Structures are given as C-alpha cells and as structure tokens.
Image: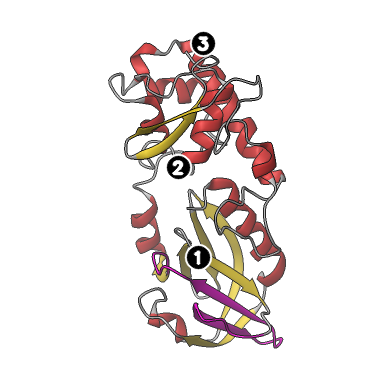
Amino acid sequence: MPELPEVETVARQLNDKIKGKTVNRVEIFDQKVIDSKLKVVPYKIKSIYRRGKSIIMALNNEKFILTHLRMTGHFYYDPKEKTRYCAALFHFSDNTTLSHNSIRRFGHMKLLSKKELDAELKRLGPEPLEITEKEFVSLLDSFPQANLKNKLLDQHCIVGIGNIYAQEAMYSARIHPEKKIADVSPAKLKQLHHHVQRILNLSIVNNGTTVYNYANIDGKGDFQHLLSVYGKEKCPQGHQIRKIQIGGRGTYYCDRCQR
C-alpha cells in the first residue's frame, strides 16, 4: 500500500498537472471504486493535498474529492488509451484527461462536503512530519504496553507511516522491532523521531519507494535503492537480516544492530 512519501509524491504531481482545471465530463467504469456523484459537472480543482495516506482535492463548489489509493490505485495524466483497470476518466475543459485505475478495487474516490470530510479525517493521528520530538515521545509513552512497531503503523496514533518506513526508521534508531514502548528509552524514542522524519523526507525527494506495483504519475520511485533492511539479505553493516511476523506483517531487522 502506498505510504506517506508515495501519496505525497502523487498529490504534488496532481497539483502540478491539474490544479486550476475544470472538469466538464466524467466517465465512470467502476462504481465500487468511484462515487457516482462525481459525474455532476462542472467543477474546478482548486488545490490538491495529502492527509495521512489520502489525497484530497478541494473543489470550487465547497466539495472535496477524497481519494485512497490502497494497494493498487493509480492516476494517469492524459493517458493515450483507456486501460483494462480504468475505474474513471475525468475530462477537463482544455481537452486533457485524468484516469484513475484500480486493479484490485480496494481504493476509492468519494465526493464529500466539508463536514463529511472532517468526520473522515478526525479519526486520524498527527502527521509524522509535523509532530515535534516532545509530542512524539509523549504520544508513544501513553501506550507503554504496546509493541512500538505496531503503534507506528496505527493510523489513529500517527498517520502515514507504513510497514516499509517503520522498519527502516527502527533500524536507523537501532531499536528491535519486538520491543514494547515501555522498554524503549526516551533517548531512543527521540532518535526514532529524527529518523522517521529524515527517512520520510528523503523518500519524498526520491518520489517514494517502488516495490511490487507502485508507480506515481511520472513513473517509478527511487527510494527502494536506499533501503537498509526492507527486503534485504544483509544490513548496511554486512550482518544477516532476519524476517519475522509482527502484528501479521512481515518485518525485516538486524538482530546485531537492533537491540
């Protein structure tokens, strides 16, 4: 599933390509993925931004399009042809188009009012790139018996961090992924805060991580070339990587570097 850097990359690219454009026709091919209310046109795209792992398009009619890509959602700008998994095709007044594809149909695009959008978003935790070190440590310390990696993945606690970046940040902070929060020192949690922000920002610069089938509007990401433990056989120190299951998620770590 696309995590914060991948979604941020797509949101920025959408801003570059469709901000200010007017939608004058919408073809919907999969109503499980696409809200049928999106066919009521015209409307203008005022801005596009990210919250957690969701993309939000603000419209000129005081409505919002909330998009969650889930595992296999993709946007294509001005595609040459409609693909097999195209869920919707948005036509703009300048004769360009935007398609939304969804192979496994787990994602969605929903038209919401401000009140409905706020209700959707209020359940989410703070943004990891905005939370301060003090707030980060205090937040995690309020769940002393929780597994630290699982809590990093809890979108009600902190949004946007997924399995890949939790593993990478915990390796950089030298924290064993099976540890409970109570067993991690405040100094280590401060290091973790630093590495979460560093790694997420570095991944955004590299347009995210392309593993399996993630692609942004302009192509693939490059952060997969900078991963330390995820999907690796050895860590940067040359030690053997181990893989275990934590909370039902595959977890790569180095038992020599991470204590």
Looking at the rendered structure, which numbered label has been put on residue 187?
3
Q: In this view, does 99 lie to the left or right of 186?
A: right
Looking at the rendered structure, which numbered label has been put on residue 82?
none
Looking at the rendered structure, which numbered label has been put on residue 73?
1
- Relative to 97, does residue 179 appear above or below in the rendering? above
- Relative to 227, does residue 192 appear above or below in the rendering? above
Q: Is mark 1 on a helix, strand or loop?
A: strand
Q: Is residue 116 left or right of residue 166?
A: left
Q: In this view, does 259 lie to the left or right of 31?
A: right
Q: What type is the residue that disc 3 sits on?
A: Ala
Magenta segment: 81-108
> Distance of mark 3 from mark 1, alpha carbons?
38 Å
Q: Which residue is drawn at 47% across and 53% down?
A: 1
Precedes in sequence: disc 3 or disc 2 = 2
Instruction: Using a 10 Å C-alpha cutoff, classify the residue at mark 2 as few (fewer than 14 neighbours), some (14 to 19) or many (20 or more).
Output: many
Where residue 225 appears, as percent x and y from the top left, is 69, 41
> Distance of mark 3 from mark 2, alpha carbons?
22 Å
Q: In this view, does 27 lie to the left or right of 97?
A: left
Choose between 31 and 51: the one closer to the eye: 31
Choose between 111 and 197: the one closer to the eye: 197
**Magenta stretch contains residue 23:** no
Q: What type is the residue that disc 1 sits on?
A: Gly
- Closer mark to the observer between disc 2 and disc 1: 1
Looking at the rendered structure, which numbered label has been put on residue 159?
2
